Each structure stands twice: as structure tokens, then as C-alpha cells.
Image (spheres, rainbow, N blue to C red):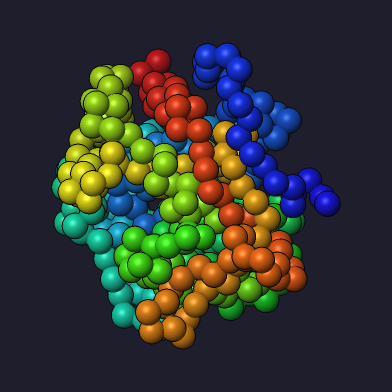
Amino acid sequence: MSHELEKRKIPPSGVPYRVEEDSFYDKCFDGHPLPVWFDCDTGVDDAIALLLLRQLPCFRLLGISTVAGNVVLDKTSYNTLCVLELAGSDLPVYRGADRPLIRDQITAPEVHGMNGLGDVILPAPSRQLEKEEAWDAIYQAARACKGGLVLIAVGPLTNLGLALAKYRDLPRLLKRVVIMGGGARGGNTTPAAEFNIFADPEAAEILFSSGVPVTMCGLDMTMKAYLTSEELEELGGLGSPQAKFARDCLQNTLRYSRSLGQPGVALHDPAAVLFAADDSIFESYPAWVRVETRGERSYGKTVTDLFSDKEMPGRSHRVVIDVDRDKFKARLFELMGRYGK
């Protein structure tokens, strides 16, 4: 079995964990920055992910594309520019799809606030969106990287579905895709479906069927990557404008999460970003994954053989099911703390 298809479990903690001795962001990929494209629907957890990306030198971030999801496209695009300016980044941002491929559009203002950033208002950005369409920009970046590009997608997968439909050679130009979405066991928008997949199941099915290796950072893992209300205050206490924004924009989502009986606010998108940087604090397994696009009650479900007696052929994807929360928190705090230095 190849290294890419090995089962990967979280190593036991033999000594107290100190992230400053871990230096995961300097050691990953043997010191060679990995070319990365980030596709997002900037709500509150996307915003934290963007802030983390700014502090990860193991990535050579080439561009960012936006898609409708947590809020409508005009807001996700505007939010992305605002957060990048807060992070001190001048990366190009490309406007993507403003609606799903087929289904009616859904958004999640009850989670992300009416503006998508927990109703926190950031200064207006000084930059504009690029003129090129997102799916065209993704393809050009993949061609330039000659098969080495890793794409991290943390929103509905419409832009990828359009890119794969338009450019038939794109699958061989992508090293892998890491998504925040789906789940092996269940959903959060319906009993079967997670929000990002449910927002555009047809696009997700195009991706999983394309031949590109996909790592699914779904609810099985991301619900365990949470911060409590006390930890959010600790995050804001780091003192930088970026850390205070992170604390403030997550308050609405924290209230929503607590109303559902959850212990804190799950940082879904940051968990996917940190997995892409270094998977050593996560547990993942090879699996076959497809998306249900015809079922009435199961529409949008990510169907996987991970827990099945029947193993399907072509198990080229990975499903992430667990994370060491203490180490996740330590890494997140260390990266956010770099804004104050």
C-alpha cells in the first residue's frame, strides 16, 4: 500500500505538548513551500482560515477564489478582501459562482450573521477583485504548477465543478484537493447532509468522480476542533487586531452552537487548513466517496465505504475523522499569536 493510502492515526502524547518545539509550519514539505489555491465562501470560520494562511510559510499561496455559500457572493467576495487587508495580504482574489449548478441557493445567516462576519464591520478594502473568472484562474494556476497544485476548498464546490467541466485536463494538473465538507456519519443542515455539500451536491459529485484525490475534512473531525467561550476570550487576549477580530466575529456562531448543546464553536475551515499543512495531529483513512444527488431524504449526503463491510474499488480519497484538540488549539494560538510579534 502506498504512503498516500496508509491509515494515519494520531500519535499518543508521551510528553506535554509545546507547539514552539513542534515548528510544524517550518518543517512540512521538507522546507519547500507547497503551491496552494484557496477557494472560500468567507463567513466567520473562513475568515479565521484566511488569517492562519497568512502565517503558514509552508504554503506558497497563489490566489483565492470566492463562491456563494455562507452568504451571497457579493458578501463573500467583499469579506475576503476585507479579511486579507486585515491580515496584511495582497493576494489576488477572483470572483466565482453566484449560485449552485442546479439546486436553489441556500445561505446560513443564522450562523454567520447577516454580513457573514458575525456582523462585525471591517474597514472597506482598498483593493478590487480580479477580472478573470475564478474557474479560469484556478485552471491557469494548475497549469503553471504542472501537477503540483493543492487546492483547499472550504465552501460549496461550485467553482471546482465548473472548472472541471470546462477543462477536461484539470484532474491531472491537480496534486490533490482538501475540502471542508461532508461527513462519514451524518449532517448538520439535514440529518444526512453537511452545509457545504448540501449547498451544491452536484458540484461535489463532479469533484469526487473526477479522478482527483480528495481529502474530506468533514463533520466527523471538524466538530471536535472547537474553542470554548473561555478559549475565545483567551484568543482575543493575544491583543492584536487580528486576534480581537477572530474573537468578536465568532461570538454569534458561539451563541448558535451553544443553543444546540455544543461545547463551543467549531472551527471547521481552520481545521481543514491545518490538516493540509500537516496531518500528524489528525486521524484519516483511505475511502471511496460519492455524493447522493437523487435521494429525497439523503440529498447531499457524502456516501463512503469507510465504515462499511463492503469496500468499493478505487478508494483514492481520504476521510478525516479525528483531531487532537489540544494540539489543534495550540497550533491555532501560536499562528494567531504571530500577528502580535
> In percent of the image, x 52 and y 73: which residue is there?
291
**Would you say 202 lies left or right of 236 here?**
right
Q: Quick check: can you spot residue 218?
A: yes
Asked whether 261 or 83 is in front, the reply is: 261
Q: Position of residue 246 (x, y in %)?
A: 28, 35
Q: Position of residue 322 (x, y in %)?
A: 52, 43
Q: Quadrant of the C terminus?
A: top left
Q: Position of residue 2 (x, y in %)?
A: 82, 50
Quarter where residue 154 is shown: bottom left
> In percent of the image, x 58 and y 14: which residue is there?
15
Asked whether 308 or 125 is in front, the reply is: 308
> In percent of the image, x 38 and y 84: which residue is there?
296
- Count of marks overlaid on the render: 0
Q: Position of residue 48 (x, y in %)?
A: 36, 40
> In percent of the image, x 40 and y 69: which residue is there?
192
**Would you say 24 lies left or right of 185 here?**
right
Q: Quick check: can you spot residue 211?
A: no
Check the image and report above or below for 76 versus 273. below
Asked whether 292 or 61 is in front, the reply is: 292
Quarter where residue 76 is shown: bottom left
